[in-house]
Image (cartoon, rainbow, N blue to C red):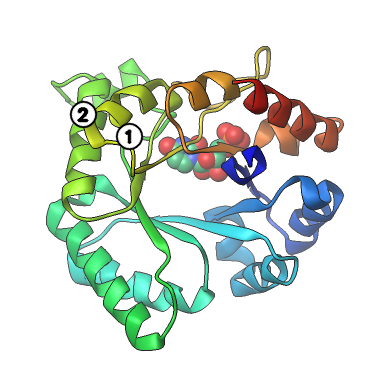
Amino acid sequence: MVKDKLIVALDFHTKEDALALVDKLGDSVVFYKVGMELFYRVGSSIIEELKKRNKKIFLDLKLHDIPNTVAQGLCSLLYQGVDIMNVHASGGYTMMKTAADTVRAEAKKMGIEAPKIIAVTILTSINEADWEGLGQTASIKDQVIRLAKLTKEAGLDGVVASPQEAKFIREACGEDFLIITPGVRPAGASIDDQSRIATPARALADGATHLVVGRPIRVAQNPVEAVENILKEMENA
Ligand SMILES: O=c1ccn([C@@H]2O[C@H](COP(=O)(O)O)[C@@H](O)[C@H]2O)c(=O)[nH]1
């Protein structure tokens, strides 16, 4: 169902504000993303509340450290019981492989299903000028493809990338690979601090498995209508 492919970003400072949106959207949204803004402030209580409402959860904390630290950090997060967790692909092959192997072994010991582990390629806010400032020589697109292939080789379940790169990642990494795309903007919506964006229809047509949408829903005058319009566009894609 198309609604399983929409992940709404709960970028709020308080649990009350986040749950007010969740309750307003009701059954139209089944998947939520909890990121650092909300989790650092309210911790696991938001996860418990979302689970009480039978929602799926992507815990987007983007871990980036040495292999053992990331692996053990993810093992601590396993107790949250979320569906997807993530690391930065620029942490490298060894970090990603250690993280995925350790988390899966720990989940097995705990008798729970391991969450999907995915890696952030290049943030969707990064534009050509930022990229040049980082001293990179490959293009953003080539580096995203390289990191996606590395993520796959390390045994992770998928990547976070811009919808503009979804098509190339799908070609390089095959069908059975999650491509989760933030940077999704319905036509005419404010771009905010995103750079490499596409519409919901384009993102899906190019091979994204899930679309992450925050502000176009969160700050909409009518968030319920904003979700309905995005889902309609996704259905027609
Ligand atoms: O490359 C990335 C990785 C993560 N994000 C996160 O997605 C949402 C997008 O929110 P919008 O309001 O729709 O821009 C936000 O939580 C980011 O932290 C990303 O945008 N790009």
Q: Earlier in the sequence, mark 1 or mark 2?
A: 1
Tell me the distance, in whole angstroms, between the alpha carbons under discs 1 and 2: 8 Å
In what element is the residue under mark 2? helix
Question: Image height check: is 1 above or below 83?
Answer: above
Residue 48 x %, y %:
66, 73
Instruction: Depth check: give the residue in front, 220 or 31.
Output: 31
Ligand 1 contact, mark 1 (Cβ < 8 Å): yes
Question: Image height check: is 213 above or below 187?
Answer: below
Q: Quadrant of the C terminus?
A: top right
Instruction: Depth check: give the residue in front, 68 or 133.
Output: 68
Q: Tell me the number on the disc at residue 122.
A: 1
Question: Image height check: is 16 above or below 88?
Answer: below
Residue, x 33% and y 44% (percent of image)? 176
Residue, x 36% and y 70% (percent of image)? 74
Instruction: Depth check: give the residue in front, 158 or 74.
Output: 158
Residue, x 16% and y 49% (percent of image)? 153
Residue 193 x %, y %:
53, 27
Residue type at tag 2: Gln
Residue 191 x %, y %:
59, 20
In what element is the residue under mark 1? loop
Q: Is residue 197 visible?
A: no
Quarter of the image for residue 134 reads top left
Q: Quadrant of the N terminus?
A: top right
Q: Tell me the number on the disc at residue 143.
A: 2
Asked whether the residues under the numbered discs 1 and 2 touch, taking CB atoms below 8 Å apart as contact, a structural biologist would say yes
Name the outermost residue toward the top: 188
Residue type at tag 1: Ile
Quarter of the image for residue 224 reads top right
Judge from the rendering whether residue 193 lies leftward or rightward of residue 130; answer left or right.
right
Number of numbered discs: 2
